[in-house]
Every structure is written in structure tokens, then in C-alpha cells.
Image (cartoon, grey):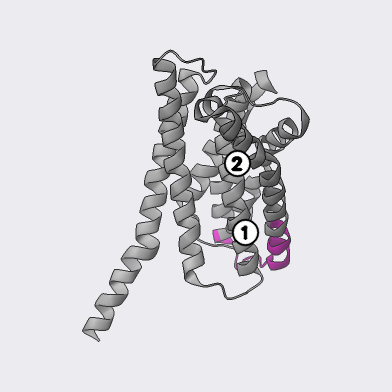
Amino acid sequence: MYNWWWLSIPFALFYIILVFIGQIWMRKRNKKYELRKALIIWNVFLAVFSFWGACRCVPELLHSLTKHGFQHSLCNPILKKGVTGLWLWLFIISKVPETIDTLFIVLRRQQLIFLHWFHHASVVVYCFYSYGLFAPTGRWFTSMNLCVHTVMYSYFALRAARFRVPQFIQQSITVLQLIQMLVGCIVNTAAYKYKQDGYYCMTSNSNIVVSVVLYVIYLILFAHFFYLSYLQKGMNKNMKERTD
């Protein structure tokens, strides 16, 4: 798997092609698919998987931080074997079936935004690429992503089951995603600084560059989504109330 990470690139391209073909096909159909029960099961499965993974990976990150320091957590390789190694591998592999999220959106004829499919496609490639290098910063990215996904997929499951969830929960999830992207940028910048200062650091410059570029793009896209979904809607609502 270390030497075959590039196979994620044709997979990502195939995924994008299928997304647009699927949208065209669904526009020609008179009826959308409901799939509510399947969606609930799927989101519950991903929430449980993410929670279990977080319980296995976060302790390793905390141990690295508390016992060896910040520099160690960014620069010393992650364990390739044992429980942490297994869950790191499962995390990477999970990015492939996570693209099924898009299938539900397309088949249920919901709005599919650029952020969604770009994020899925690029994350698959980046995760396989980083796993091929065994980038030490991956312990941060894996732990953060699993924690955020635990909350996110739990929320999706509740929404799919038609529970009334307060809007601030949805806003909080987007804030968590923004924090994740910001921390990702900080972690990579710190790893680069350690390398420049002559510290031992196994995180490659190429991985740092690719990671920073992606995290900055994600940060911009999620910030734009937050603005359109919550701030702009709130301003429009206030304007309407004033004019009514």
C-alpha cells in the first residue's frame, strides 16, 4: 500500500466522473430515492467507527505530547504496528467508502456543493499519499478528523431519523471543522519550522507543502460555507424583519 498510493488518483477521478453522471441521470428521473433508513444506518456506522477510532488514536497523540513534547508529535514516525498502526490503516481505508456520502446526496436529489465532492476526492488522495510517507503529522490529522466525524455523523444520523436538532449544533460542527483546518495549518507550519531549525523531523517538505495547500483551501471553503449558511442568512432574515 505504501508504494501504491497513486492508485487513489484514478479512484478520485472516477468518483468525480460518477458524481456528475449520477446527477445527470437523476435529473432525468421523475422520482428521487428516499433511502432514509439506509442513510440512518450508514451515518450511525460512521459515527461509531469514528468514535472507536478516536478512542484508539487520540491517546497515542496525547502520549506523544505529554511524554515527549510537541516536536516529537510532529516529527517522530507514527507506530506502524499494534493498535495505533491498525487504526491508522483503517482510517486511511475508510476515506474510500466515505465517498458513499455523495451517493446518498445524488440519489436523494439534494444540493451537492463543490466543497463536498472536492473535499472527498482530495482527502482520499492526500490520505493515501501521506500514508505512503508515514508522515508523523498524520497523528494530528487522524485524531482531529475522527473526533470531528464522531460529532458530524452523529448529527447526520439524528437528522436522517428526523429528530429536531438545534441549529447551533450544525453551526458548532462547522466551527469544529474550521478549527480542524486552522490547527492543520499550524501543525504543518510548526513542523517546517522545526526542520528549518535543524531538529530531527521525519515529516517531508513535500508533504508539508501539499498539506498546507489543502488545509488553506479547506479553510477558505468552509469559511465561505459558514458565511453563506449562517451569517448571510441571518443578515437577510434581519433585513426582511425590518422591512415587513
For the N terminus, the image quarter is top right
Stretch of the chain drawn in magenta: 27-42
Q: Residue furthest front?
A: 67
Q: Residue furthest bottom?
A: 244
The magenta stretch spans residue 208: no
How packed mark 1 is, by other alpha carbons closer than 10 Å (few <14, some 14-19, many 20 or more), is some
- As rendered, which of 100 and 81 lies closer to the eye? 81
Q: Looking at the image, tell me whether mark 1 or mark 2 is earlier in sequence order.
A: 1
How packed mark 2 is, by other alpha carbons closer than 10 Å (few <14, some 14-19, many 20 or more), is many
Q: Is 232 placed left or right of 95 in the picture? A: left
- Give the amino acid at mark 2: Ser
- As rendered, which of 150 and 67 lies closer to the eye? 67
Q: Is residue 161 visible?
A: yes
Tell me which corner region of the image, top left, top right, bottom left or bottom right, holds residue 126. top right
Mark 1 to mark 2 CA distance (whole Å)? 31 Å
Q: Which residue is mark 1?
A: 107
Determine whether the residue tagged by mark 2 lies in a helix, strand or loop: helix
